[in-house]
Amino acid sequence: MAMKRAVSSAIRSITSSPPAFARHLHASGGSKKIVGVFYKANEYAAMNPKFVGCVEGALGIREWLESQGHQYIVTDDKEGPDCELEKHIPDLHVLISTPFHPAYVTAERIKKAKNLQLLLTAGIGSDHIDLNAAAAAGLTVAEVTGSNVVSVAEDELMRILILMRNFVPGYHQAATGEWNVAGIAYRAYDLEGKTIGTIGAGRIGKLLLQRLKPFNCNLLYHDRIKMDPELEKETGAKFEEDVDALIPKCDVIVINMPLTDKTRGMFDKDRIAKCKKGVLIVNNARGAIMDTQAVADACSSGHIAGYSGDVWNPQPAPKDHPWRYMPNHAMTPHISGTTIDAQLRYAAGVKDMLDRYFKGEEFPAQNYIVKDGQLASQYR
Ligand SMILES: NC(=O)c1ccc[n+]([C@@H]2O[C@H](COP(=O)([O-])OP(=O)(O)OC[C@H]3O[C@@H](n4cnc5c(N)ncnc54)[C@H](O)[C@@H]3O)[C@@H](O)[C@H]2O)c1
């Protein structure tokens, strides 16, 4: 009873009254049309039976869904008026998408999707969905909160070290038959003693701070919410209420906030100018938190001495995306949150939510991004 009340109260905290025209999520039974949009694995699909996050793996839920009489269509073809996804928009009930190969769910697509009730994100970060349009249409948007936070925090630690040690040019030398220690050493540093600030200290930010603790750095964080004093004590991280006060102090800045109306374009030319000259920036949060050209210009001028991350705007990044060509970057495709371990966790989370949806049960409260016409608090 107490558990039920706690869940109801947590759900209430992200909701208020539903829109009059809400599509009733748990109202109807019967066979559902479920569409999944994932990246295609081609020759890699058969190399690992646990590789479930791709089109071929289909989150490992095909047999389970089809045995219950549901239709399950999986594709990577998500762009343009003639794509496979577009064909199913008018009659799908559930769309499973993933940040790694985002199916952009625009207001226009939502308007066309007359049967749509549920948008599930296989992973974390549902900014590829027009959340306001989803809320206005009475749709439910949920993600697998927490599913890949360790994967991302570990990856961020790696990127910080890669930039600090100037690893990428060293790797290129090894691969191309060169040997020029000076060409690497003149801008390689230790992490110890440096000031590192995370902007956003939620699940990933906190795990990163814990992982950085043994490196003996000065740790700072900015968030809309001050963290638990116990965790502050454990990590030694100091809170900066004003992001513009944190930025000039940092040798390394790590972005760990969602993409929202408030964070979109937050790192523009003016904010980058407030960073220390020679700052290193790691961003595995979302590409659109940065002004793309401002980052490329600051890398070219040397104001940013290194930029690394796995998130771009848009995705897949076009061949001429400026971040592919800027100096001193250590960019990759969107990979940090899609390790095999993470895939198994977010596949299990999606299956659990589908199961609850079929049974008319609530989802874990922390998974809701849009419910009953309201966005979760950090997206408002
Ligand atoms: N690259 C990847 O593979 C990958 C995987 C998972 C998550 N992510 C990204 O990382 C983000 C963070 O994930 P998380 O699990 O830590 O989320 P989280 O919700 O646990 O933490 C987000 C933190 O950001 C803070 N925040 C939100 N808006 C803010 C603002 N305007 N100013 C200051 N702080 C603000 C929140 O208070 C919260 O503490 C996700 O939203 C997603 O975009 C990327």
Image (cartoon, rainbow, N blue to C red):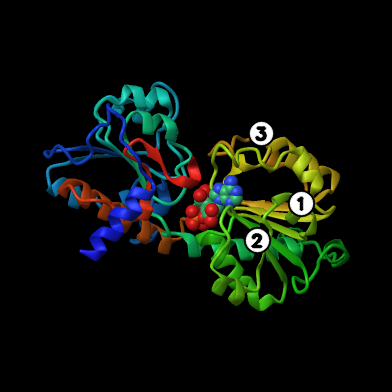
Q: Amino acid at mark 1?
A: Asn
Q: Secondary structure at mark 1?
A: loop
On the image, numbered disc 3 is attached to which residue? 320
- Foreground residue, 350 or 182? 350
What is the x, y in percent for residue 119? 33, 40
Q: Distance of mark 3 from mark 2, alpha carbons?
A: 34 Å
On the image, numbered disc 1 is attached to which residue? 328
User: Does residue 58 appear in the picture of this structure?
Assistant: yes
Q: Distance of mark 2 from mark 1, alpha carbons?
A: 25 Å
Say which label, 2 or 1, has the lower sequence index.
2
Mark 3 Cα shell of 10 Å, populated few (<14), some (14-19), many (≥20): few
**In the picture provided, is 200 more to the left or to the right than 220?**
left
What is the x, y in percent for residue 329? 72, 51
What is the x, y in percent for residue 136? 37, 29
Please, is residue 221 above or below residue 85 in the view?
Answer: below
Seen at 70% across and 51% down, the residue is 243
- Foreground residue, 173 or 323? 323
On the image, numbered disc 2 is attached to which residue? 221
Nearer mark to the viewer, of 2 and 1: 2
Q: Amino acid at mark 3?
A: Asp
Nearer mark to the viewer, of 3 and 2: 2
Say which label, 3 or 2, has the lower sequence index.
2
Seen at 61% across and 75% down, the residue is 233
What is the x, y in percent for residue 125? 47, 47
